Image: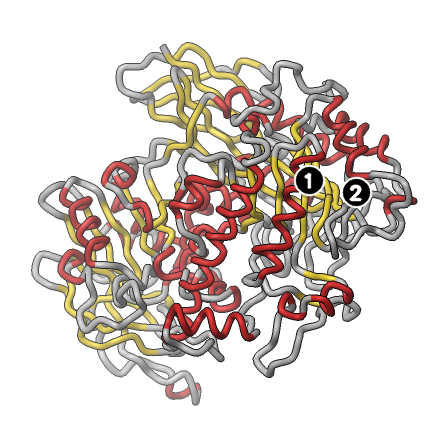
Amino acid sequence: MLDAAPSSSTPLRTPDWYRSATRWTQLTLAEDDPVKFDPQQWIDIFKRTQSNATCISAGGYVAYYPSKVPLHYVSKFIGDSDPFGTLVEGARGLNMHVMARVDPHAIHTDAADAHPEWVMVDRDGNRMRHWAYPDVWVTCAYSDYNFKFMPEVLRELTTNYDIDAIFANRWQGHGVCYCDACRTDFKAASGHDLPLTNSLEDPAWLAWGAWRRTKLSRLVVEWDQVMKAIKPHTSFIPNMGSVSLMEFDLDMIEKYCPFLCVDDQGRHGTEPVWKSGRNGKRMRATFQDRPAILITSIGPEEAYRWKDAVTTGPEIRAWMDSGTTQGLLPWFTKFNGVVPDARWIEPVAESFDLHARLEPALAATQPVAEIAILDPTTTLRHHDHASRRVAEAHDMGFYHALVEARLPFEMLSDAVMTPERMDQFKVLILANSTCLSEAQAEGLAAYVARGGSLVVAHESGYRTPDNQPRDTPVMADLLGYRLTRPARGPVKNTYVALNGDHPINQGFDGAARIMGGTHLIGVEAVDGSEQPFLFVPDFPDLPMEEVYPREEPRGAAVIARQHPGGGRTVYIPWNIGAIFWEVFAGDHARLIANSVRWALGKRSDVEVEGQAVVDLSVREGEGSTVVLVNNITNPMMMKGPIREVYPVGPLTLSLAVPAGRELRAVERLSTGEDLDFALADGRVRVSIAQLETLDAIQFHWS
């Protein structure tokens, strides 16, 4: 199996070619590779990994083919060879799909001297040399370099080579460019001078984000049109992180991007191993049915850029398998065609082999869930890369709490909150959707009136879509509160006290109060609302003799409300998601899980029992349900690289039997074996004796 070539029935060179491109090899060449690497070794790797598609370095900063485009720098090692053409021919010989990679983010001195307007300029008016290699220059992504020069490169590649697409890396630019053309264009479009800060209170910064979105969306359209004019089945595929969906016009992506590439190649710093799978949920949050691919590096992804190194095999597999769990197609990337360290090949082949085994069931099913986290694109699109990480902490905290609680869930973008999309879920979570429109708030209220439930935290709805503050939060009436004091903080040594007997404050046995947040909002609950937790009024944290409460608990810290249509709402007026993400207090995790379970109002359709940390995904198709169970139990779960796998088990998987269905069989897809099952009280229970990494259990119904 591992050496099998892709089937000759693969739909090559058709507009739907990408649908059978499900396992990708990317080779990013170094300039001296033409005289050092072995193309046949890579063709063998294509076969070894069961790759059915490949992305190969072609041009842009360096051309790996004999380009005739003026000022297109060709590798000085190329001689009479054509490395790109050789690899294309080898891949096509295996009936693989082929995508050419270009990188337009830098140019050599001859091009910079001939066209100084192609070079990015900093805020002090200096042309920018490359931060890592000062011999070359950083390009302005909004200049004629991208709009006139690069289209000539795309024409040449599409005309001369048997490719299906061109993939661009680092094509979006590197922040604000202060060149004369950008100054003039931005001023004419917005009326503002270019921003000097990334403050959300700066109207020029907000206007620049919209201007950049328009320029880059136009670029995608024009590059795609250049290719289709030559070969109608081809496409331009921009490299995107999961956050890129909020940076571009959705209509443009819908029309011009047949599939989506997530460039999140591995963990760096302190980062949970489930984060690669989150990218899959996030892509589906906007484009529910569009294929999405996870790019994984075989090396470490730390800030020190060991790009030609190899990380541990278990880490490679864990990152890929997390993506597979949440519906992302696997893609690995190797920098440098020379392979001095081959330890990555086996784990990549194993992960790709598992994907090949699961692929038939994955292709025949679609992800489903009762719960969804609302992806706050309206809020996050105002942020740059650095501030976005802070803003996303609220969502990350809720995400991790749901993983720990073993509650399967999806994500839904607030940009596509149609009634049809919302009604796929019984509970929507707004961890801190600060910017919401009146129409979005009305849609959420209608969702609750139809029986849907909300769990809402912190400053959700406190600002307009343009980031302007509101005097009255847009969802206050729905959630059952009046604002009495705006957010304040950071505040130390805060607590919330249990109030009465409510499902949301269960499980804290022995505690009268638990840790609170660090950014607090004063609210007053309206009649008809319950208050499972109250704020403990502030008291000092030093001197130690002064650390005691002066007043009795007062002021709603959690507001729970049942609505006439059957929906439920929970409002937590403090930063529970962000503070849980920072300190990982168990009480905060329990409070989040309790709130979601109460909002759900029923037993979860899928449950897993046993000692393990697992990431879950549920998929449904005609006559079957597939539950993917990804074992992420590991001392390195939050900080890679993983050294070894820690098997878990036995686990018991419990699933509610769909109405009107009878169970025929239960199959473990990694091995193909049938599993014993027990039926009782409308649920089926299956035992998994041992789980090493990722597996999928398929329930066949009649």
Residue, x 54% and y 20% (percent of image)?
360
Image spot of residue 661 (x, y percent): 31, 14
Q: Distance of mark 2 from mark 1, alpha carbons?
A: 9 Å
Q: Indicate the quadrant where residue 573 lies.
A: bottom left
Residue 261, placed above or below residue 663: below
Residue 76 badge: none
Name the quarter where the C terminus is drawn. top left
Amino acid type of disc 2? Answer: Tyr
Q: Which residue is mark 2?
A: 65
222 lies left or right of 484: right
Q: Nearer the viewer, residue 379 or 270?
A: 379
601 lies left or right of 199: left
Name the quarter where the N terminus is drawn. top right
Q: Nearer the viewer, residue 196 or 583?
A: 196
Q: Indicate the quadrant where residue 378 lies.
A: bottom left
Image spot of residue 507 (x, y percent): 34, 52
Instruction: Give the mark nearest the N terminus, 2 or 1.
Output: 2
Residue 313, placed above or below residue 302: above
Q: Secondary structure at mark 1?
A: helix
Amino acid type of disc 1? Answer: Leu
Circles 2 and 1: CB atoms closer than 8 Å: yes
Q: Which residue is mark 1?
A: 157
